Amino acid sequence: MIARLTVPAVASPTASRIGDAVGPGGATVATATVLAVAVAVLSTLRPTLRAMRMATVTALAATARQPRHRPWLTALSALLPTPLLLGLRLTARRPGRAVLQACSTAATVIAIVALLTLYAQPERGYGLDGSAALPNLRGEHDRRLMLAVTILLIALAVVNTITFTWTTAMEARANMAIARTLGATPGQIARGLSTAQLLFSLPGAVIGVPLGIGLLSFFAAGNSAEPPSSWLLGVALATLLATAVLTALPARLAARRPVAQTLSAETA
């Protein structure tokens, strides 16, 4: 539905276009739906089968793995601020989720870098000596199409960030409650959850910029212009700032849950 409504804005960049953009047919919609469902099923098939094949006795008898005791690491962590310490603990406990968050951030940054590179190219019209008297409709269409793709990737990254933050908060609610009983404030808990997501996003934002430039170098012309370095630095900083803002609300809501209610629910 949303894609169908955005087709005119992407496919009809000017009022001089004759006719209207043709929407996707029923076969195209059905194929896209089947592919989306197939991706969702395949991504959850392996962990589901693994959980189904595990014997009930084995699952109930499984004990938590004791972490290795490293005195030097304990002494080093004692020097860190409480939010950073909590964020590092959450990151170390969930390395797979850190990789997923980093990949999501990197994909978003790559799309933004590609969009900035496209807008950094000099516009050359079809008029005399490349004047803009006759605009380049193909270039304008490409910019709008890339803008639409980038907006979709940003929206997906926003949903992933909020989901990862809330899921991390729900899984670590017992640990966060214990940290509060030891003196951590709700504000420190909230900042710790936000720090965990920032630690996930930091490598993705750093790697996404050179990956975007390297990927575009394979498809761009030899005389193509590169976006200014200030733009690229702004993309990385804006991505991290947006991640911090998006994680603030779910982290704050999770940190305000009463400690007694959380611990009683875990022991029930």
Image (cartoon, rainbow, N blue to C red):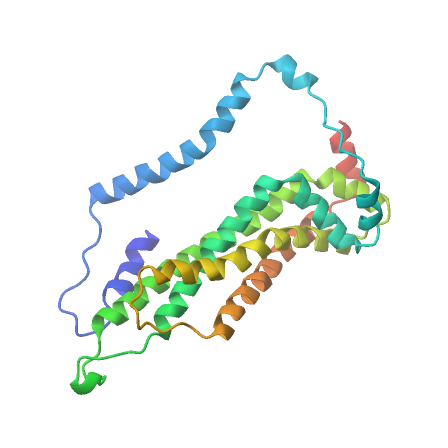
Q: Going 69% across and 17% down the picture, which residue do you hit?
A: 61
Does 70 appear above or below 226? above
Q: Going 60% across and 51% down the picture, which residue do you hit?
A: 200
Does 195 appear above or below 90? below
Does 222 appear above or below 79? below
Q: Position of residue 238 (x, y in %)?
A: 55, 66
- Report whether 252 appears left or right of 27: right
- Report whether 193 appears left or right of 81: left
Q: Nearer the viewer, residue 231 or 143?
A: 231
- Residue at the front extreme? 222
Q: Position of residue 221 (x, y in %)?
A: 29, 67
Q: Position of residue 243 (x, y in %)?
A: 58, 58
- Residue at the left extreme? 18
Q: Going 20% across and 47% down the picture, which residue do you hit?
A: 25
Q: Position of residue 91 (x, y in %)?
A: 66, 45
Does 28 appear above or below 231? above
Quadrant housing the C terminus: top right
Specify the quadrant of the image occupied by residue 133: bottom left
Q: Going 57% across and 40% down the picture, which residue do you hit?
A: 96
Specify the quadrant of the image occupied by residue 147: bottom left
